[in-house]
Image (spheres, rainbow, N blue to C red):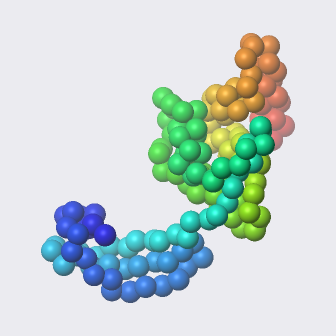
Amino acid sequence: MRCPYCGSDQTRVVDTRPTSDGIRRRRKCLACGRKFTTVERVAPQLRVIKRDGRREPFDRQKLLRGLQVACTKRPIQAEALEKISEQIEDELVSRGKAEVSSQTIGNMALEKLKKLDHVAYIRFTTVYLNISDLKSIQEEINRLLNSVEQG
């Protein structure tokens, strides 16, 4: 483990505690003496069922990249997108099922983006729902506007 302050790989574990999201370790750098915390997460064995029936391992980084593309040039912090991808992964794992459909993941991402940024939501929707014509995009914008006015 490298020290985030000086980059040294000479660290020592001071304390270890299990948490709901993994194992939290308190570490001390032997080079600079500063302390820092790491969290080790158990990698879920979650599999995604794609629309064509293929199955592949869940990849949070792939989800995060999709969110980042939708949020390109939008005033959204990278940490917010990290948090969304973590929340989605945590919710999927907590369901206790070994497999989940890609539609479920996409719908969860859409709901979170709808609350975060409407433009990012529309961008994600056009790719996720494979919308290729202006009329369909306009219909989705109208649905979004109606839900915003009602909520």
Residue at (33%, 86%) from the top-left corner?
A: 14
100 or 141: nearer the viewer: 100
Does 90 appear above or below 139? below
Q: In this view, which residue lies farthest toward the top?
A: 134
- What residue do we see at 15% from left, 74% from top? 31
Quadrant of residue 43 within the rendered picture:
bottom right
Is residue 111 visible to the viewer in this orientation of the structure?
no
Which residue shows up at 67% across the image and 60% down it? 46
Please determine whether, in this image, residue 110 is positioned above or below residue 142: below
In the picture, which quadrant includes the N terminus? bottom left
Residue 146 lies in what quarter of the image?
top right
Image quadrant where one finds the C terminus? top right
Q: In the drawing, does residue 1 fall left or right of residue 29?
A: right
The structure residue drawn at horizontal position 58% and vertical position 33%, both measured from the top left corner, is: 70
**Outermost residue, front direction?**
54
Image location (x, y in percent) of residue 71: 55, 34
Q: Relative to residue 115, is residue 40 drawn left or right?
A: left
